[in-house]
Image (tube, rainbow, N blue to C red):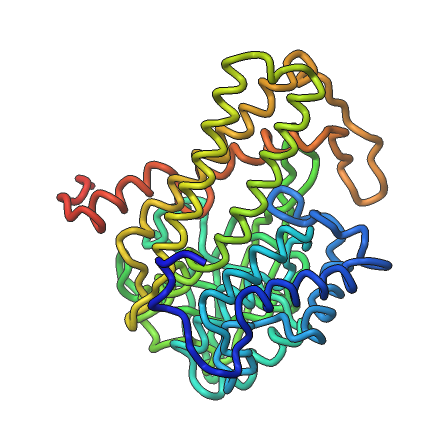
Amino acid sequence: MSELLTSEIATGTNQPTEAEFRAEIRQWMQDHLCGEFELLRHRGGPGDEHAFVQERMAWERELATGGWTGIGWPSDHGGRGLPINLEVAFHEEYSAAGGPGRAGLIGEGLLGPTLIHFGTPEQQQRFLPGIIAGTEFWCQGYSEPNAGSDLANVKTRAWRDGDDWVIEGQKVWTSLAQWSDWCFVVCRTEEGSQRHKGLSYLLVPMKQPGIEIRPIRQITGTAEFNEVFFDGARTSADLCVGAPGEGWKVAMGTLAFERGVLTLGQQMAFNRELTEITETARELGMTTDPVIRQRLAAMWSRLKIMRWNALRALRVDDDVELPREAMINKLYWADLHRDMGELAMDVLGAGALLTRYSEAHEGDAGDLEMGPEHKLFFFSRSDTIYGGSDEIQRNVIGERALGLPREPR
């Protein structure tokens, strides 16, 4: 493991060495990612989140029985309290073994750490056990039609009605909403407030009257994302994380956790995709093309840089803010992945034009019959938009990391 993590590594005598821990993960994955779960290998990641959803939910419970959920959470909140280097090792080995996209990712990776840091003891006791056990699933209610990368522009509102909050508004690009039990929703709770003031962070049950979910069909025919409409939806007054009106701080804390150790598994998935592109290039004789060879080598180098940047940024301070180094990561990997999709198409050459729709089944819009290169190309176009567009990311780097004047509004 990199020296960059040395100061983060716990030295408790009960912790396994990193080599022992990696071997344990590899063996467990070999023993369990088989049989009924064999079909999940390398499935369910970004662009493939519609695949085998119920099976991946069952896989979350399988992970929980092995103690592989919440491994970095404090032990008094149901986790294993493992140091950062072992968290990194888990995500890398999990991805390398073909572990499927995590149906519990949003709960374990985003909401759980947020509740541990900002939640009340009652909220922690209510929600953390279900996340650890893989029995309750979450989605994220941030983006809106006019507040995508600009989260402070949200218009969804909520107001108190006795012991409840009542919610009106719309969210969009909500991953996994159609399968989730709960959603954490950023909404405006102070009438007349603007920008980041007057927002609250509410925990809202999804299975209730007053919530309508509309899948967004994509060019691939699938629907990873959804529109979610709140029309008089309710949640209990005590399910506001942080004080009412102070939801901006909590929401920014959640985003800091999103930019943390979870990106290491993403790095391994990118490595696998580049390996597949390289193998395809060999099969098609494209490795004799000096331009393709140079682009493959450059992509390999960019992936190494991505990993080192991610490692040096794995630090969140007491105010739940990432270091300045982390502010380049989203822009870097989004552009890298888009370029990888374009490289995949160029390796295929004329074969990149050959796709067709399969026959739609009941309740399905059909799917494009295409190889992994096509799926990579189509989905990676969205990488530069979701989670903060490239334009917004450049503003973040300029204003927050470099201290430049704010963009005129």
- What percent of the width, then of the height, locates residue 233? 55, 67
Left or right for 383, reference 137? left
* Farthest left residue in view: 405
Vertical relation: 166 (above or below) 351: below
- Residue 37: image quadrant is bottom right
Question: How many numbered dots are placed on residues in this image?
Answer: 0
Residue 318 appears in view: yes
The residue lying at 63 percent from left, 58 percent from top is: 102
Residue 124 appears in view: no
- On the rendered image, what quadrant is the N terminus found in? bottom left
- What percent of the width, then of the height, locates residue 51? 73, 48
- What percent of the width, then of the height, locates residue 17? 53, 70
The residue lying at 22 percent from left, 51 percent from top is: 400
- On the rendered image, what quadrant is the C terminus found in? top left
- What percent of the width, then of the height, locates residue 184? 50, 66
Left or right for 405, reference 392? left
Q: Nearer the viewer, residue 128 or 157?
A: 128
